[in-house]
Image: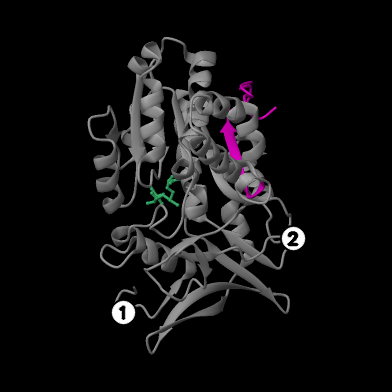
Amino acid sequence: MFDKKDHIIPLDRFIDNALYHPSKGYYMKKKSFGKSGDFITSPNISIIFSEMIFIWVISYWKHFYTNKKINIVELGAGNGEMMHQIIISSKKFSNFYKNCEFIIFEKSKKLIQVQKKRLKGLKVKWSKKLNKIANKPTIFLGNEFLDALPVKHYLKINDKWYERYVEKVKGIYRFKNINCDIKKLEKKLNFNVSKNQKFLEISFDGIKLLKELNNFITKNGGSILFIDYAYLNRRMFDTLQGVKNHRKIDILSEVGNADISHLINIPFLKKVAKEQKLEISYKSQREFLLNLGILQRADILASKKSFLEKANIYYRINRLIDKKQMGDLFKVIHFYKKNNKFKLGFK
Ligand SMILES: C[S@@+](CC[C@H](N)C(=O)[O-])C[C@H]1O[C@@H](n2cnc3c(N)ncnc32)[C@H](O)[C@@H]1O
């Protein structure tokens, strides 16, 4: 996983390699999604999840851009399930559909192939660069996208700050902490992060990407909607986890054979948003989906089904909204520009 000459690399570069190394990276070779994969995401649990996202998107368009052209861009589309359902639902609304350009922004070549297969025959494009997307109002969507980006770790030990690196010794990966200048880091971020913290988990890739998205919507109009694993504590802690066969594992074991993700820290994200002059609202996945009418939609879908099919629909929805399952752990996060009064799902 290491370049030959590098025996030690920063944690975020290690994660990036473990997931996207051209031949050995997890997302470059494995079938990760679904029951037979390592984890399952909301669009793969129930199509109703993607239908709710679609309702949010079309309502946004109606509110601001009726009869105007718009881009719907999905960031990190996995196996393409969410985009598939969004396009299928859009087709039922011809005015919206004809004004929409559907675009996927995806890093993994392997997953692009999977997506192309799933979305065959549908009106969708892939874009490798955000700055190549046509200048028009744009809704950026990402499910489990932010929480899949690489992070850096900083640790305070005996009043000194260290950055976490990964080294490989005799074939075994292990962490190594190296002195760092936390003031320099705060200067780069342009806000204070270390006060009252003993541990920091930061995705600079995420911050950079958010900046690009922000620039885009500042210029062209639109919003950013993310659905991610997230937590609300002010105190940050180590949330990094490997996942294989639906089980949590140490990120240094099974390198390249397991997914790696983390939890988004909402107080930190608020600081990032403020620094970038972006507004932010969030709700638990449960509240957001209930606000959008997921139960009413389930009732409609279930009404003409057999008892077993009905049970299956409600069982899946329960997974998405139950407080002990995905309902509370996942947060829907809306980034928008000042004076944007669109609050659907977030009231
Ligand atoms: C955990 S998966 C979620 C997939 C999908 N959204 C879902 O819910 O099933 C993360 C996705 O983001 C993609 N990804 C990660 N980092 C990316 C980046 N920097 N640019 C574009 N795509 C990225 C991955 O390849 C993968 O498709």
**Circle 1 — which element?**
loop
Give the magenta range.
Answer: 328-347
Q: Is residue 284 visible?
A: no
Given the image, on which type of amino acid does mark 1 rest? Lys
Given the image, on which type of amino acid does mark 2 rest? Lys
Name the residue carrying label 1.
5
**Circle 2 — which element?**
loop
Q: Quadrant of residue 195?
A: bottom right
| Front one among 143 and 12 | 143
Residue positioned 53% across, 19% down in the render: 59
The picture places residue 30, in percent across and down from the top left corner, at 32, 61
Residue positioned 31% across, 74% down in the render: 3
Looking at the image, which residue sits at the far bottom? Answer: 170
The answer to if 37 sits in the magenta stretch is no
The CA span between labels 1 and 2 is 37 Å
| Label 2 Cα neighbours within 10 Å, binned few <14 / some 14-19 / many ≥20 | few
The picture places residue 193, in percent across and down from the top left corner, at 68, 57
The picture places residue 21, in percent across and down from the top left corner, at 31, 64
Residue positioned 43% across, 60% down in the render: 38
Is the N terminus in the top left, top right, bottom left or bottom right quadrant?
Answer: bottom left
Taking the image as shown, residue 223 lies to the left or right of residue 37, namely right
Name the residue carrying label 2.
195
